[in-house]
Image (cartoon, grey):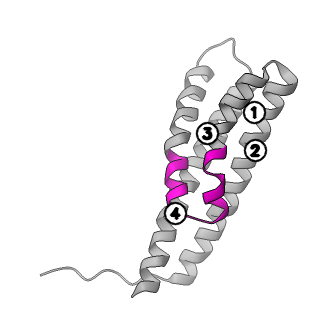
Amino acid sequence: MAKQPKAIDTAQVARKLDIARKLNWICYSGLLLLFAVWNLFLDGSLKWWLLQTIPLLLVLPGMLKRRQRSYLWLCFILLLYITAGIVDVMMPTRGWQHGVLTALSLILFVSAMMASRWQVQLQNAKAR
């Protein structure tokens, strides 16, 4: 006997999705700002700035259109930033930028993952 799917409160899921999307934009903008300040003003170069920002900018059109797949791709891309940030945080000679990079990347990863999940839940609820 197959289980019946639980009914979800679409208003509550929509609120969660809205909060997750706002958090996505805050952390996404924070990462782009961090890379700009770090590479263009502190001790980086234009080449490093481009290398760090282009992967994030690849998903920007889909995020503006609120596509679920773009949030998933953002999560995959963020795994690189999280890994690099954690490795650099563990090195004693690194600056504050690496801690901020790690924190923003982790928060953005979780919020993008949850936004993707809640968006699918809303789409499935509307399809029923």
Residue in the image at 81% along x and 18% along y: 43
The image quadrant that residue 71 belongs to is bottom right
Amino acid on which disc 2 is placed: Gly
The earlier-in-sequence mark between 1 and 2 is 2
Q: Which residue is mark 3?
A: 55
Residue 35: which disc? 1
Asked if labels 4 and 2 touch by Cβ distance under 8 angstroms, the answer is no
Q: How far apart are the alpha carbons under marks 3 and 2?
A: 15 Å
> Label 1 to label 4, Cα distance in Å?
25 Å
The majority secondary structure of the magenta stretch comes to: helix
Q: Which residue is mark 2?
A: 30
Q: Earlier in the sequence, mark 1 or mark 4?
A: 1
Q: State which region is magenta.
A: 57-75
**Element carrying mark 1:** helix
Nearest the eye: 110 or 78: 78
Question: x, y percentage for residue 118?
Answer: 50, 68
Label annotation for residue 3: none
**Quarter of the image holding residue 64?**
bottom right
1 shown above or below 16: below
Q: Are marks 4 and 3 in contact (CB under 8 Å)?
A: no
Q: Is residue 45 magenta?
A: no
Of badges 1 and 2, nearer the viewer stands 1
Disc 4 residue type?
Gln
Please name the residue shown 61% across and 39% down the image.
55
Using the image, tell me which numbered label, if any, was put on residue 68: 4
